Image (cartoon, helix red, strand yellow):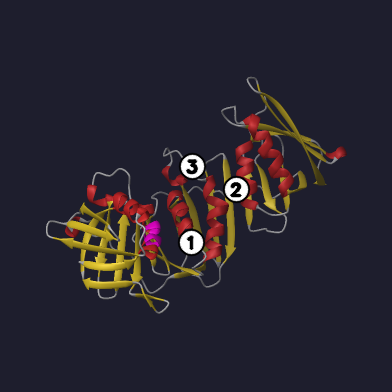
């Protein structure tokens, strides 16, 4: 194998596939990058057993030759060292070649490295799923779904299914739900003639890494489902993830549809007030802040106290939609995460009492809700 490749384009491909290089694995070969040079171009593959990423760089990009192939071939190159080397080299073109004994030579300008590689036959045979019935989705919509839900997934493996986001499609509607039992994020999207009905759970980590790949150079995504795997095709990038086993809990009954108290407030004022209150609240284990709705003054009073640090009091002007006074306590960080997911000018906060879950939503967007379970006030 011997090629010359544009360094900047190679770095871009490496930035994609690096997300699936494991730091710890019982199979040392998985710490490497699978290089396959064919007459068509360069294929790169990485996998940590849960996520597999494959990219293809053609010989020409925008009618400009970016790869010169002197000899086709394949090898596994140590991922961590190779990426760091390519980052630090200064030239525009990198020459990569292999020779007997699975050694790899990397040349650029007056720099030359030789790395110990692996025989490509040692790499697990990972099949990328493809079929004739992909789901088509706009890139920006997929990014929005991830941004507005994934932060509510559970960190603990006590209930593995809660570490993912539930994607459920039925009757021309896609419903995406994430919950860790203390908060819940839900995004509902109308999608006509999308696919047969499905009910799957995608690992939160997979969605976070996928979101980093969904950059502005891609407009749409093709999604494939098969064999407990999901594959996202984004241009010349294939991102495949295993799906989580288990049945996702039914959450429909958990989300209230009517409320006794509702207020409207400015998004930026709310976020800034909770962000400042969190400076004191974060000194506590559960980051608790107290909310006091004062209807006669059209105010929301936010307070937090720490015996070691001190206390804070924030006032936010609100518009009373319905109901009266209420005192309730919750995690400041949960509120901040929910507000960042909404990210619009007017926020509606809806309550049914001091120990009942409450909801935050965008006044102008009925497709997204953020639900938070309060904590008992001392």
Spot occupied by residue 328 in the image (x, y as percentages of width and height): 71, 34
Q: Nearer the viewer, residue 22 or 158?
A: 22
Q: Earlier in the sequence, mark 1 or mark 3?
A: 3
Q: Disc number at residue 154?
A: 3
Q: CA distance from mark 1 to mark 2?
A: 33 Å
Q: Which residue appears at 47% of the width and 52% of the height?
A: 208
Say if 360 sits above or below 310 in the image.
below
Is the C-beta separation of discs 1 and 3 under 8 Å? no
The residue labelled by disc 1 is 214
Left or right: residue 293 compared with residue 181: right
The residue labelled by disc 2 is 253
Q: Is residue 14 magenta?
A: yes
Q: Which residues are magenta?
A: 11-16
Spot occupied by residue 201 in the image (x, y as percentages of width and height): 44, 53
Q: Is residue 92 magenta?
A: no
Spot occupied by residue 30 in the image (x, y as percentages of width and height): 26, 51
Q: CA distance from mark 3 to mark 2?
A: 20 Å
Is the C-beta separation of discs 3 and 2 under 8 Å? no
Left or right: residue 62 compared with residue 285: left
Local SS, label 3: loop
For this orientation, the residue located farthest to the bottom is 63
Q: Is residue 50 visible?
A: no
| Residue 320, picture quadrant | top right
Say if 134 sits above or below 330 in the image.
below
Q: CA distance from mark 1 to mark 3?
A: 23 Å
Local SS, label 2: helix
Left or right: residue 49 compared with residue 331: left
Between circles 1 and 3, the one closer to the viewer is 1
């Amino acid at each position: 194998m011997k090629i010359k490749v544009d360094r900047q384009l190679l770095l871009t491909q490496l930035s994609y596939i690096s997300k699936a290089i494991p730091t710890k694995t019982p199979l040392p070969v998985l710490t490497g990058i699978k290089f396959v040079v064919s007459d068509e171009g360069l294929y790169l593959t990485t996998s940590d057993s849960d996520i597999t990423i494959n990219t293809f760089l053609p010989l020409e990009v925008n009618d400009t030759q970016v790869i010169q192939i002197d000899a086709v071939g394949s090898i596994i190159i140590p991922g961590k060292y190779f990426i760091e080397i390519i980052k630090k080299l200064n030239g525009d073109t990198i020459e990569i070649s292999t020779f007997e004994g699975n050694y790899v030579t990397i040349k650029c300008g007056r720099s030359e490295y030789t790395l110990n590689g692996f025989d490509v036959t040692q790499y697990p045979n990972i099949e990328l799923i493809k079929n004739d019935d992909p789901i088509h989705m706009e890139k920006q919509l997929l990014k929005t779904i991830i941004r507005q839900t994934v932060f509510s997934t559970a960190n603990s493996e006590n209930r593995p299914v809660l570490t993912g986001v539930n994607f459920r499609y039925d009757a021309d509607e896609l419903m995406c739900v994430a919950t860790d039992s203390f908060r819940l994020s839900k995004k509902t999207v109308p999608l006509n003639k999308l696919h047969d009905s499905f009910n799957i759970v995608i690992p939160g980590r997979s969605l976070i890494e996928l979101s980093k790949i969904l950059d502005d150079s891609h407009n749409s995504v093709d999604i494939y489902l098969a064999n407990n795997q999901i594959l996202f095709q984004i241009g010349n990038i294939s991102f495949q993830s295993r799906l989580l086993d288990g049945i996702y809990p039914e959450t429909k009954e958990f989300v209230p549809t009517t409320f006794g108290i509702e207020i409207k407030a400015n998004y930026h004022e709310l976020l800034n007030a909770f962000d400042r209150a969190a400076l004191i609240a974060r000194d506590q284990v559960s980051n608790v802040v107290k909310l006091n709705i004062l209807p006669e003054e059209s105010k929301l009073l936010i307070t937090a106290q720490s015996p070691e640090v001190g206390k804070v009091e924030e006032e936010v002007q609100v518009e009373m939609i319905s109901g009266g006074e209420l005192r309730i306590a919750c995690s400041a960080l949960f509120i901040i995460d929910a507000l960042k997911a909404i990210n619009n000018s007017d926020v509606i906060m809806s309550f049914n009492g001091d120990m009942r879950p409450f909801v935050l939503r965008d006044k102008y967007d009925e497709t997204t809700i953020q639900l938070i379970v309060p904590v008992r006030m001392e």
